[in-house]
Every structure is written in C-alpha cells, then in structure tokens.
Image (cartoon, rainbow, N blue to C red):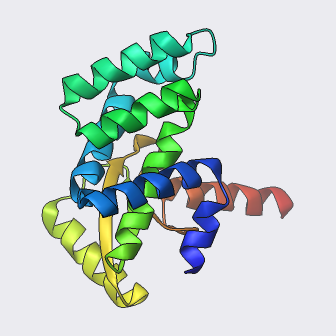
Amino acid sequence: MELSAGIQASLAGRYASALFDLASEAGTVTAVESDLEKLDAALRESEELAALINNPQISRGQLAGVMSGVGKHLGLSELTRNFLGVLAENRRVSKLPGMIRAFATIAAAQRGEVQAEVASAHALTDAQLAELETKLRAREGRTVKLKSRVDPDLLGGLVVTIGSKRIDSSIRTRLNSLAQAMKSA
C-alpha cells in the first residue's frame, strides 16, 4: 500500500508501524488509538510536558519515570505504557507527536478511512462538521474521519488538510494573496 510505504520511510512512521503491528496481533488497536489520542491531548494541553519530552538534558531514566507516570495518570493500556518506555530508553520521546499522527493514519487506512483535519477561526457546530464530512466523503470517495481545531489567526473560513492535500479557504490566505497581488501591480 502506497500510504504505508510513505509512512515507513520516517522514523516516527517506523515506530508507529511497529506499535500498530503489535496492537493488531493483540487485538488492541482501538485501545491504543484511544491511548494515543489522550497522549496527544496531554501534549497539546501541557506546555511543561511538551517541553520536557524535547529537553535533551533529561536522562533516559528520568524520562522513563515521567512517561511511566504519564501512562498511569492517563490510564493507558499496558502496550502503550511499554511503548512509551521503549521511546524513553531510545531517546525518541520527542518524536511522539509524529508517531501519534502516523499511527492514526495507519489505523484509519486499515479501516478504509482517510483522516482530515479542519482548522477554523471559530469552533464549528456538529451540524457544520457533519456537512463538511459529507462533502469530503463525496470528494474522497471513502469515509473521512474529521478532527477539528480552532485557529483564531485564520480570521474566518477553513483550512482542511487531508494527507498531503490542503484546501485553504481562510480569510488570512485570501488577504495575503491580495497583498501579494497589490505589491506586484
């Protein structure tokens, strides 16, 4: 599968792929995917945790202890906690955000889904998300798993990312394009 080859090329992809294979064998793909979503949220919400995983001065042992504590605190499955231990031991915890994205992509592909991220200036309603999901499903020809986030810098409109494709209808981009056109005129 083409997607898998692209993911396999990166370090984060190789780790995510190995974790997916282990979760598949154990029948715990859904649990691990849920664990990784919790970890992703923790990394986004805690600047301290995000800074810690990127700090080269933290020893492997200290990092392993922190990751073990995070795993217990979040109630992660044994496989995910062991995975975090391996990452700490190999000094690869800083690559965790990429591994989380790669795992989600692999899991979605196995289910015949494609992942899409939508960024908007204001939170979208459930009805707006459902309508967008329907339009993207028609465009992509398969189920689209939508993840949304708010980015006030966009001013308005949407930026939708599906794999390596980006659909940018944000006001910020339109204003930047207009400014460029005015400079060259």
| Displayed quadrant of residue 145 | bottom left
Report x, y in % for residue 132. 29, 74
Vertical relation: 9 (above or below) 43 = below
Report x, y in % for residue 69. 29, 18
The C terminus: image quadrant: bottom right
Q: Residue furthest right?
A: 184
> Count of labels shown?
0
Q: Nearer the viewer, residue 183 or 148?
A: 148
User: In the rendered image, is residue 114 in sight?
Assistant: no
Left or right of 137: which side holds 167?
right
Left or right of 69: which side holds 84?
right
User: In the rendered image, is residue 174 in sight?
Assistant: yes
Q: Nearer the viewer, residue 79 or 34?
A: 79
Q: Residue at x 55, y 71 (%)?
A: 4
Q: Residue at x 58, y 16 (%)?
A: 55
Report x, y in % for residue 29. 28, 59
Q: Residue at x 38, y 30 (%)?
A: 43
| Displayed quadrant of residue 106 | bottom left
Vertical relation: 112 (above or below) 155 = below
Vertical relation: 4 (above or below) 73 = below
Q: Nearer the viewer, residue 181 or 107?
A: 107
The N terminus: image quadrant: bottom right
Q: Residue at x 62, y 71 (%)?
A: 5
| Displayed quadrant of residue 164 | bottom right
Report x, y in % for residue 117. 40, 60
Q: Residue furthest front?
A: 25
